[in-house]
Image (cartoon, rainbow, N blue to C red):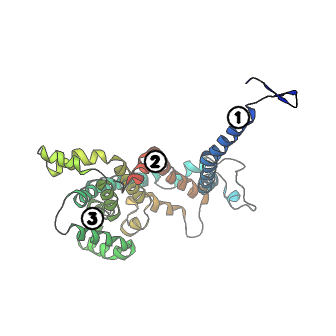
Amino acid sequence: MANTSYSVNGKKATNQHSPQPLILKKKKRRFSVVLKKSILPHAILMSVGFLFLVPFLWLFLTSLKTPDEIFAIPPKWLPSEWQWSNYTDATQAIPFFKYIWNTVVICLFSVAGQLLSAPLVAYGFAKMKFKGRNVLFYIMMATMILPYQVTMIPLYVLYTKMGIVENAPTLPLILPNFFGAAFYIFLLRQFFMGIPNEYSESAKMDGASEFRIYWQIILPLSKPVLFTVALLTFLAAWSDYLGPLIYLNDPETWTLSLGLRGFIGSNQIDWSMLMASATMFTVPIVILYFFVQRQFIEGISMTGFK
């Protein structure tokens, strides 16, 4: 901007208007907005995330230590020599890959059963109108109050009298998933209710049956919540310890969560190999969540919105 001159008491004076103070104010204001809305929230989330990462980091580093370094005082974060042989020794000390295979089979069948049954029931509660629908839904929701510890003894007696525990011990861990879980049915129902009814009504006008509407319209629109149900079911089956402890008496049928007891002897515990096995037990869950986290978050966040 050009200089302007004016007369004060007959004398000429100049006043130079500079844009720099205004630009500095805008930059400071912009930086404060970025700080509040981006930098500070991300810094807090990273700090909290690091706190959750510390136990896993300690588990991994402990799996690479010698037994003497594990119980060293003061504690040592980094091992003096990285004992990668702990991992190979752990897989040889127990039938590790056999336990992994047993666990994966149970997880896959559990996920398949949940995805077959829970969406069907949820569709009935969300989109089909029939007498007593709300009453049945409330009864189903009331079953969530009962913890597994209350029902495990009657279920064990039932499966034993049916001969399932003796002939097919892994079946009690898989079969309940083919009848749907109340929480997953509720989650899917809330998502289905957020899908506009116009889609179903238009399909009915074209002569589509209820199952065709469910299979070709509702399910393709519900991929995020289906991923969420699949992930939660997989994690529950993968980390389940009480169920295998009750039903799997033959070591050949043990899952990995149960097989880790092989490192716990009557007199001592091989902590190095136990930590190595626990790390290998945890890594698949972290990898799985890494690949499906977007669908998982989307499925949770969109549930209940219309």
The residues tagged by marks 3 and 2 sit, at their Cα atoms, a distance apart of 38 Å
- Image location (x, y in percent) of residue 180: 29, 61
Whole-angstrom CA distance, mark 1 to mark 3, is: 80 Å
| Residue closer to the observer: 271 or 13 | 13
- Say if 159 sits above or below 84 in the image: below
Label 3 or label 2, whichever comes before in sequence order: 3
Report helix, strand or loop for mark 3.
helix
Is residue 47 rendered to the left or right of residue 290? right
Say what amino acid the circle numbered 3 marks. Answer: Asn
Q: Which numbered disc flags the more N-terminal residue, 1 or 3? A: 1
Which label lies toward us, 1 or 3? 1
x, y (%) of residue 258? 45, 62
Few, some or many C-alpha atoms within 10 Å of disc 2 (few <14, some 14-19, many ≥20)? some
Q: Determine the residue located farthest toward the front in the rendered image.
A: 10
In what element is the residue under mark 2?
Answer: helix
The residue positioned 32% from the left and 62% from the top of the image is 186
The residue type indicated by label 1 comes to Ile
> Which residue in the structure is indicated by mark 2?
293
Q: Which residue is mark 3?
A: 167
Rendered residue at 70%/57% (across/down): 69
Secondary structure category for the residue under label 1: helix
Say the numbered circle drawn on residue 23: 1
The answer to the question of whether label 2 and label 1 lie on touching residues, with beta carbons closer than 8 A, is no
Mark count: 3
- The image position of residue 7, as x and y in percent, is 83, 28
